[in-house]
Every structure is written in C-alpha cells, then in structure tokens.
Image (cartoon, rainbow, N blue to C red):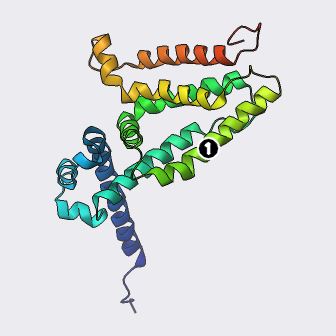
Amino acid sequence: MASDKSPALPVKNAGGRRLQNRDRLEADILAQAVRVFAESGYEGASIATIAERAGLSKQNLMYYFPSKQLLYQRVLDDVLDDWLARMDMLANEHDEPRDVLRAYIGAKLRFSREQPWASRVYALEVINGAPLYGAQIRERVVPLLRKDIAVFEAWIAAGRIAPVNATHLMFAIWAMTQSYADFSAQMTLVLERKQLTRKDYEDAEILLTHMVQAAIALPGAAPGT
C-alpha cells in the first residue's frame, strides 16, 4: 500500500532555499548600507535610502534590521571582522620581522583597495569619536594592537630590530595604508584619474614597506636585507 506521507527532502530543501534567500537579501542590504553610511555618515544616512538602493520597501528592510543603529552596528561588525582577520599577522614573534611587516602592509593595502567603503565607514565613526562603536573597538581592536606591540617589543629585546616606539609605528602603518581608501579622492585628483589603479597600490606597498623596514633596521644593516 502506498504511503500517504509526504517525502521530507523537498521540505528540507525549501527551508534551505529560504535561508539562502534570506542570507542573500541581508548581504544585498549590507552592501548598500556600507556605501550609504560611508557617503553620508550615520546621521546623514537613512533607512529609506538604503532600502531604495537595495530594491526594497522600508518596511521590508526593517523586517531584517529593525533600526538604523542595529544596521549600522552590523555593518561595522562585518567591517571589523574582515579587517581583523586580515590583520592577524604579527602574532608570532619568532617569524622574520621584515617578512611579517611586508605581509601586514600588503594586507592593509588590499583591504583599502578591496573594501574602500568599509574603510571609510570605520574611519568616519572613529573621526567622530566612536560614539556608537567605541566599546567594540576597545574590546576587539585594542587587545590586538597591544599584542602586536608586544611582538615588536620582543623583537627589540632580542636585538632583531632597532628600538622603536612600536605604538606610534603601528599608528603610522594604519594611517599610511588606510589613507588609500579614506583619502583616495584627494589622491585621484592629484593623479588626474578617476580611481586608483592596482599599480598605484603595488607602488605604495613597495614604498611603505621600504619606509617601515628602514625604521626598524639595525644600525649598519641595509633595509630589506
């Protein structure tokens, strides 16, 4: 006798498709939100503008993100997740300092090239005093920075690099690499082109790496050797 039970597999597939559609829609909303927040800042951005760019009604968007602050915090969470994943390169003090710093600078510049809107959203939050995201920065960024500083101090103590103020060296690396996203409009005006090219980033990586390696070179040692 034939069973009157419906097969379970199509139901599971339908549920999986719903989850995939939800994930895809959230990704579309976040992609539009990061750009709107980067262009207008938190105060100037509106849920209505983000919804329009995502092809949704305001009500539909708010089903996924009930408030502008929750959407903004999710954007910054994703920015920080990506940034910190790329930056976790100074953890091993036994690696070669020059190679580690070369990779670190390269990763920071790639983030600026691949995620310029994300970099600008984060920069705007910090420039404004981190009123909505300061706690997360203290919780996630500061410990990683202190860990990186400890690696520099271990290298200095072992005589592997010249004595430097590691905190300010890290500030300088961040400023130099992030400027290629946050101030790219100024750079393109100087260069008289619409956007920075891959070669611009490659040239920047060579120069910035040379500068940082020169700063940590031991007396009498040639940078990069």
Q: Position of residue 221 (x, y in %)?
A: 75, 9
- Percent across and percent down for residue 3 are 39, 89
Q: Amino acid at mark 1?
A: Leu
Q: Is residue 221 left or right of residue 203?
A: right
* Looking at the image, residue 210 lies above or below residue 6: above
Give left or right: position of 96 versus 69. Answer: right
Does dot 1 land on a helix, a strand or a loop? Answer: helix
Q: Quadrant of residue 160?
A: top right
Q: Is residue 99 above or below residue 67?
A: above
Residue that label 1 marks: 144
Front residue (pair 60, 72): 72
* 69 and 101: which is toward the camera: 69
Q: Residue at x 30, y 56 (%)?
A: 25
Task: Characterize the local packing of mark 1: few (<14), some (14-19) or many (20 or more) Cα atoms within 10 angstroms.
Answer: some
Q: Quadrant of the N terminus?
A: bottom left
The residue shown at (18%, 56%) is: 56
